[in-house]
Image: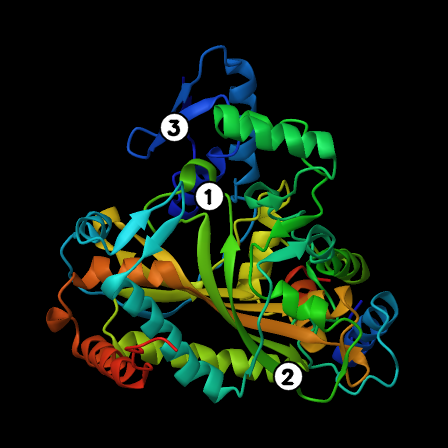
Amino acid sequence: MEIAQAQAVETLRNFIRQRYNVPLDDADFSDDVHLFDYGYIDSFGAVDLIAFVESAFDIKISQSDLVAYPLNTIREIADFALQRRKANGI
Amino acid sequence: MTIDLEQLDADYLAQVRYALAFISEDVVSYDIDAAAKKITIELGPGADEAEVRTRVGEILSRYDQSQFGMKTVVDFEQKRDLPALDAWAGMLERRWATPVGDGHVVLRGPAALLMALVDHKVDSIFAEEFGAELEYFPSTIKSETLHRCNHFTSFPEHMDFVAHLKQDLGVLKHFSDSCRDKGWSPELHDGTMSRSDFAISPSCCYHAYEAMEGWELEKPGRCLTATLHCHRYEGANHKYMSRLRAFTMREVVWVGHPAYIISGRARAEQLIIQWAKDWELSCRFETANDMFFTDDYAVKASFQRQQQGKKELRLDVPSEGRSISCFSSNFHSTTFGKAFGISVAGRPATSGCIAWGYERWVYALLSQFGFRPEEWPAGLRDDYERFVRDRRTTLPARAATPE
């Protein structure tokens, strides 16, 4: 089933807001904010995020993916997940 | 005993070489032969070889990075063809350095002046650029503070804890009498020390965060600078001046909004590269990771490198055939802001710092350029001569007659 980019972004945004306690009035939080530089997610949180992305988008993310692709913002993660789904024929 | 190595990656070997110093007090010495793919370990009398072998196996698997991405990005490289000059021997011969215990050194003469020059450069280039507020820190720090900084879960091996004699008249009298009658010996401390609640600070900036506990900062945040005599126990890794137990660390620290830290750090990296160019240093500025001494080393190191949370300026030491980290640029995200309740604009503050290890600078500079200032690269020589001249004119004249 094809997932639109806007839908993928919204799924990730909602998960991150809820899982990492991001207040609704946080002025810095956006789909393009660097999630790690801005402290929304740390190294331990990243493990949870990867597990969520794999489950929500039915894909696998390897350690080499983390090195090869920029996965620092909601939009970057969404784009990566959709490309990986497309490559897998999903 | 010998143990075979499977991986030969330089980074892997460096981590293993460092960690082997801490595996067991039964290990007298060890050597890694990369060509023969072997570790040779000399054990003390009565050592449990099987136990040591197991522990070496644990270390090798801890630093096995094959399943993790250890990304390296080189931002700047400047290589010079330099002779292999034994700076340590030269400093000893000239009495510019005197070792006063394992990993402890006294510097004097031009070596001391070089260290003061590096400090002066940090002030005039970095502290001024960022309007860093000067702070002074105690050398010792509460162990509780280090725990809150997660230091013990990452670097337990290099801690130097402090303790005093028990507040007990009998203990104090026995200690004093024994020293007078038989002389001091380490055994006199057995069972006579209080519980340790402080440590010698292993890093400069921890005091900065604990001293700001509960602060609500105005955007963008604040910048401060401090110098601290730090301690890191390095076991058999103490070597010349490249890995001291007692050393001097200077830092510039930012605490505040992420954009403020990120832009400050980026500007500082431009400045350090310019400094390396000005002094014609043989060096490399690249991504790095801390020597996390824990089972989750690979996860922490891999994440730190991917996020470029640490970068190092590594100066070549030709006589040792390797480079040493003399400056680092670090991004902590909200780790310390959360640990100490420091906030900016209602969110946990972010922090970052840049740090210099002064003794390493002196050692690397003398290793690269020798002992004659007139033969140093023009930028370094001019800075040094100007600094020495200015220092002479600004130092107060020695009073001829004490009042």
What is the quadrant of the N terminus of chain B in the image? top left
**Residue at mark 1: chain:** B
Residue where numbered disc 2 is placed: B222
Marks 1/2: CA–CA distance: 35 Å
Q: What is the x, y in percent for residue B229? A: 49, 59
- Number of marks drawn: 3
Q: Chain of mark 3?
A: B
Q: Is residue B208 above or below residue B320?
A: below
- Kindly identify which residue carries mark 1: B15
The 10 Å Cα crowd at callout 3, few under 14, some 14 to 19, many 20 or more, is some
For the question of whether residue B65 can be seen, the reply is: yes
Chain for mark 2? B
- Report which quarter residue B167 is drawn in: top right
Question: How far is mark 1 from mark 3, CA to CA?
Answer: 14 Å
Which one is closest to the eye, mark 1 or mark 3? 3
User: Label 3 belongs to which residue?
Assistant: B30
